[in-house]
Image (cartoon, grey):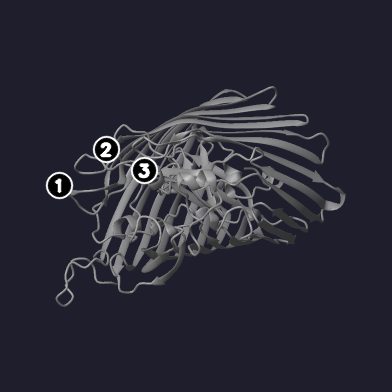
Amino acid sequence: MSNNALKRDKPKTIGEAINRVAGVSWVDLGNEQHMMGIRQPNSTNAVYQYLEDGIPIRPLGVFNHNSLNELNLAGADHVEVVKGAASSLYGSNAVGGAVNFITAPSSPTPEASIGFRNEAVNGFQRVDTTASNTWGDFGVRFSHYSSRRSADNWQHYSNGNKDSATLRSDYALNASSLIHAVLSYNNLDSATPGSLNPSDYHSNPGKSSNTFSWRKDKSTRLSVAWEGETLNNGLTTATLFGRQNDHGQLPNYTYSNCTATTGAATCVGTLNNNHVSSLGFDLKHQQDFSWLSSRLIAGLYYDRSPNSYKSDNLTVTRSAANIYTSYVLNPARLVGVRNYKADITNTALFAQWELSPLNKVRVVAGGRLDSINYNFSNFLVPAGTALGSATNRNYGALSESRSFARFSPKIGSTYALSDSASVYANISQGFTPPEVSALYGKAVTPDLKPATYDSYEMGLRTAYFDGALKLDATLYRLDGHDTIVSFTPYIGTVAQASTNVNAGQTRSSGLELNLAWKEGAVDARLGASLASHRYVTYLATQNGAVNYSGKEISSAPDTLTAEIGYQPVKDVRVALEMVKQSSYWMNDLNTVRYDGHTLFNLRGNYKFTGGWEAWLQGRNLTNQLYSDSASSSYNGTAAYSAAGNDKYNSGSPRSLMLGLNYAFNGKK
């Protein structure tokens, strides 16, 4: 999303900024919590890389599907989305794609702004502030927003706060080199209402059975980058970075072992905290050559990130009305508790060569070698370790050190059909190492290896009517090998505890279409994705009772977003947007289906003289009942019960957001 579009459309969430890109599906789970789907089904899987100024916001091994809430969209100049396997430059996890947030630089002259927005139905308010200037060779920009969602809104127990701030400084050392530093802080404190059964979803979509579950995310990042011309036609960038991520939660999705199926009961729950601190550097050099108009990009990446995790068990009380009302720590229950540290070290070498062997042909070839090491220390008594007369304890895995390494290649080419049209094709490979939680989350460490993904794409970019209409169409296929999935082994006829294994083979293929039109007072855009996501192989239980081979993967809708805008005069614009999500399977057995939905949104902006701007955003204009995420746990091994198996996350009803901004610009 460009800087102009960010300023004009003022997205409420990061999803509103990137969902307009065909093939991108940011799934709203409330208060900036989310799942993602980029050339993959919507999921919590570690198949994406999220970056700020080209530096990953989290280290390998501790991916979190919600981690885009650790970014400050108000501090971004623009957002880049790379689709398909991009591990050759961005590293592992960049399988479905990568999202890179480029921070806004210092302004050459004084500027400042303050904005306020209010959305009554959602109980949502937000304040944005920015200030920037440059004095000689030194410039600073401060960007911030604070959002508050009160408990007084359409959805029970869904209040939440977020504070985000970005401070960037830019210093020109001389005519050919500069330093810029970025300090980013984000703090999210959110209640978590949870999902609903079908009856509650249709009759009372704002209901929540929870009264105390929560999620708290704090992140601080500092990067200092030096950029300069070290060789003739050569640019070197050296970046030092540090991170602090603290993720704590009392998750309602872990409530289990209730003493009754419905009504008053006591259940088991968990309380956990996951902390990561990082130090690293990224060294990159770009060298241009006159020979075949070629360019070499090469570099070295190093990241050391100690990761600590601790969980405790809870006793949770549920009322006769099926409302979870209270909890207490349960120190007597030791099964499933965890207390460990994993020192994560990631070292990578990468290079990419671009050249033009023919006048209209551009070729790129490159690769990246990643090495990842986990040095795991269990601070509790591991499973199978004797303690007095007790054996076979269930306090986690044995301490160990484990390493993974993988080379990710890429080759691609672009052919210019004309000055305004080109075709392109790329073949690349991505990979995802096992996450720390996948290896050490249970009592026994599974023997896992990285999952790999082969990516193939070809496309067309062209423009018509003197550039008024722009088209970007892509066909792609993404084949997953050794995908890490849950597997239930058997001893005889007795099912054992599930474990993670490299037993899944997947195939995703589809067509992505982006159209943009701008002529006179009218602008329009369309982004559409038609895709198929299937398990080629996935035997979920050793006895064959659950076999998803050949099935479509759940939560994989086709998507379409379209908008038409009209600007009758220079400082006024109105736009109508349509967001369509097709029906999709709610379970991997392909027996329960969500019907899909179509939403209509409205935007309007009016800029007054003197730097004032008023704007409005209407969402879900037809007040449609819809679910941001729908799933079913039914796998065919027992009788199907919609009330017991199916879950829906209610989407927001019709709402209207009003905003007022004031901007000062000291341009002379």
Q: Earlier in the sequence, mark 1 or mark 3?
A: 1
Left or right: residue 309 compared with residue 608: left
Q: What distance separates the C-alpha of mark 1 from that of mark 2?
A: 17 Å
Element under disc 1: loop
10 Å crowding of disc 3: few (<14), some (14-19), many (20+): few
Residue type of the residue flagged with mark 1: Thr
Q: What distance separates the C-alpha of mark 1 from that of mark 3?
A: 25 Å
Residue that sits furthest to the right in the current view: 609
| C-beta proximity under 8 Å, tags 1 and 3 | no
Mark number displayed over residue 318: none
Percent of width and height locating residue 533: 40, 34
Return the residue at label 1.
Answer: 493
Residue type of the residue flagged with mark 3: Ser
Q: Earlier in the sequence, mark 1 or mark 2?
A: 1
Q: Quadrant of residue 69?
A: bottom right
**Residue at the image point whose x is 36% and y is 43% from the top:** 641
Return the residue at label 3.
Answer: 641
Percent of width and height locating residue 489: 20, 48
Give 24 or 475, whichever is nearer the viewer: 24
Residue 445 makes an appearance in the image: yes
**Residue at the image point whose x is 30% and y is 60% from the top:** 440
Left or right: residue 384 compared with residue 62: left
Give 615 or 367, whichever is nearer the viewer: 615
Return the residue at label 2.
Answer: 547
Residue 3 position (above or below residue 265): above
**Residue at the image point whose x is 75% and y is 42% from the top:** 604
